[in-house]
């Protein structure tokens, strides 16, 4: 392993490494972020959530909570939480929603990020969305309030 | 013309502003983390932390040097975690199996401090969120490790050389 590396050398190494990672992340994030924002601006995301009402019953959540899942998954966790303020949910519902959202969110960006460490897109998407749905369903089933 | 102006005012400016803020935040955090890691490495603190964490993370089937990227991702987030994973992988401190197992864990459980606190502000039960997420991430990663081992054994049985 590296022996006797001085602190200033470590600092230089760290800055060099950061620059590389930052350039990589900017290349991915800038186009993706703008596209996701466009989808939100033209209300395409809002239109899709109407169709998700029946699905949300499986998790003990109202149909409107689909907006949180959609925004969190389509844009990021902050977008999802922004919509959360408009809903009135019980603490059980918010806890289930929190576990679902923190399990699967920012899919466009995080799929691209995980692609940089060679995690296939299809695997990441299936795994995240699948685990989110299973967790929501099981928690609602097990949790008797 | 008016349409273009409203587009710029309602979409372009706020989007670019929030994008800039996000990138600024990411740049600061990534630089802080990667520099801190290099300094910790130089001071050999990393090996010490790894050994301590490894008592728990060895059950996931990852090598000792993979536990730090796991810790970074778990606490700070997947973007930063992936950056550290990429760096460790390039420096050959992690193998492919480590990358997969750490990724599976981090997919299910990352940025646990920030994300959990955001939802707590809206009335979620914090300990339930944290316990459920950690238990699910641990068991799923152990399961994936078990499956990988079975595949390895089967391939060894087929080509015994």
Image (cartoon, coloured by chain):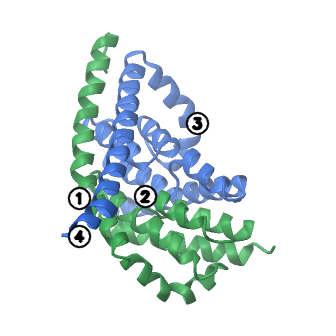
The secondary element bearing badge 2 is classed as helix
Residue A109: percent from left, percent from top: 34, 59
Label 4 is found on which chain of the structure? B
Are the residues at dot 1 and dot 2 in contact (C-beta closer than 8 Å)?
no
Both labels 1 and 4 in a single chain = no
> What is the C-alpha distance between the residues marked 3 and 2?
20 Å
The colour one sees for chain B in the rendered image is: blue
Residue A5 shows in this picture: no
The secondary element bearing badge 3 is classed as helix
Q: Which residue is mark 1?
A: A31
Where is A145 relative to B48, above or below? below
Residue A27 falls left or right of residue A44: left
Residue at left offset 49%, top offset 57%: A78
The secondary element bearing badge 4 is classed as helix
Residue A61: percent from left, percent from top: 64, 78
* Direction front: furthest residue: B2
Q: Which residue is mark 3?
A: B55
Residue A65: percent from left, percent from top: 58, 75
Mark 3 packing: few (<14 Cα in 10 Å), some, or many (20+)? Answer: few
């Amino acid at each position: 392993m590296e022996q006797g590396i001085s602190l200033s050398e470590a600092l230089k190494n760290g800055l060099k490494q950061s620059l590389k990672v930052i350039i990589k992340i900017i290349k991915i994030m800038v186009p993706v972020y703008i596209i996701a924002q466009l989808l939100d601006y033209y209300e395409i995301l809002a239109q899709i959530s109407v169709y998700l009402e029946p699905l949300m019953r499986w998790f003990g959540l109202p149909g409107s909570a689909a907006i949180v899942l959609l925004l969190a998954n389509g844009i990021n966790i902050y977008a999802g939480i922004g919509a959360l303020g408009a809903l009135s949910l019980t603490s059980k519902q918010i806890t289930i929603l929190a576990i679902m959202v923190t399990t699967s969110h920012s899919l466009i960006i995080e799929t691209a990020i995980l692609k940089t460490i060679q995690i296939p897109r299809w695997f990441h998407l299936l795994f995240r969305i699948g685990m989110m749905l299973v967790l929501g369903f099981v928690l609602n089933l097990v949790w008797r309030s | 013309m008016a349409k273009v102006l409203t587009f710029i005012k309602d979409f372009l400016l706020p989007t670019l502003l929030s994008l800039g803020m996000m990138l600024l935040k990411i740049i600061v955090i990534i630089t802080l983390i990667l520099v801190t890691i290099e300094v910790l490495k130089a001071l050999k603190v990393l090996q010490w932390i790894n050994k301590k964490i490894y008592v728990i993370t060895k059950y996931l089937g990852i090598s000792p040097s993979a536990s730090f990227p796991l810790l970074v991702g778990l606490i700070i987030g997947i973007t930063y975690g992936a950056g550290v994973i990429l760096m460790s992988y390039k420096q050959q401190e992690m193998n492919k199996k480590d990358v997969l197992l750490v990724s599976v864990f981090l997919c299910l459980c990352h940025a646990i401090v920030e994300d959990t606190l955001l939802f707590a502000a809206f009335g979620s039960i914090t300990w339930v969120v944290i316990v459920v997420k950690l238990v699910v991430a641990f068991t799923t990663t152990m399961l994936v490790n078990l499956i990988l081992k079975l595949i390895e054994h089967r391939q060894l049985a087929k080509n015994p050389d």
